[in-house]
Image (cartoon, grey):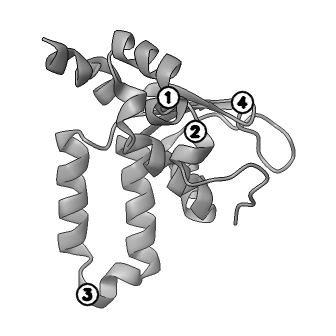
Amino acid sequence: MKFNKAFKMNEEKLSKGTWVPFEGMEFLIASAFGRAWQDAVVDHARRFSGPAARTPQAERAYAELIAEHLLLDWNGVDDDEGKELPYSRKAAASLLLAHTMFSRFVQGVATTEGFYRAEAQQEHLKNSSPASAGTSTATAAGNTPGGSES
């Protein structure tokens, strides 16, 4: 029983995402461990193999996959003029493509199990080891405080 409890995941969070706060914004990010995302990545690799993998078309298609499967919504995101930018897959793909660190942040959260643990396990991890519970979004994404973004 202890083993099952230690590795229990919140199935709803895995598929529907979990809200992750970052720098005054919030992002709804689904897990990269879902079958739909994994199938989409395999399909993308088939379509854009070899030299085609580094083309602008391949990069745009990958950003669109992240927007479709991983980055599901956001709150508090502003455009260059300071106006709130409503979430859409198109807007998400554009930001993911334009800002490498943002793309890494989303993928980092999506591949960190601690964000999708069952509530009881998440609370236990929070009390014992914050970094392993996925509570440090900057660390999970490979960011450091004061880091810059492209």
Q: CA distance from mark 3 to mark 4?
A: 38 Å
The alpha-carbon separation of the residues under discs 1 and 2 comes to 14 Å
State the separation of the CA atoms marked 3 and 1. 41 Å
What separation in Å lies between label 4 and label 2 (alpha carbons)? 16 Å
- Residue picked out by circle 4: 76
Residue identified by numbered label 2 = 137
Answer left or right for 94 relative to 146: left
The location of residue 110, given as percent across then percent down, is 40, 42
Choose between 73 and 27: the one closer to the eye.
Answer: 27
At label 3, counting other C-alpha atoms closer than 10 Å, the crowd grade (few under 14, some 14-19, many 20 or more) is: few
Q: Amino acid at mark 2?
A: Thr
Identified at 23% across, 70% down, the residue is: 45
Q: Amino acid at mark 4?
A: Gly
Kind of residue indicated by mark 3: Gly
Q: Which label sits in the foreground, 4 or 2?
A: 2
Q: Residue 106 placed where, x, y %?
A: 50, 46
Residue type of the residue flagged with mark 1 = Ser
The local secondary structure at tag 1 comes to loop
Q: Nearer the viewer, residue 32 or 135?
A: 135
- Give the vertical position of 114 relative to 60 (above or below): above
Q: Which residue in the protein does label 1 denote? A: 129
Tag 3 and tag 1, C-beta contact below 8 Å: no
Q: Which residue is mark 3?
A: 50
42, above or below 38, in the image: below
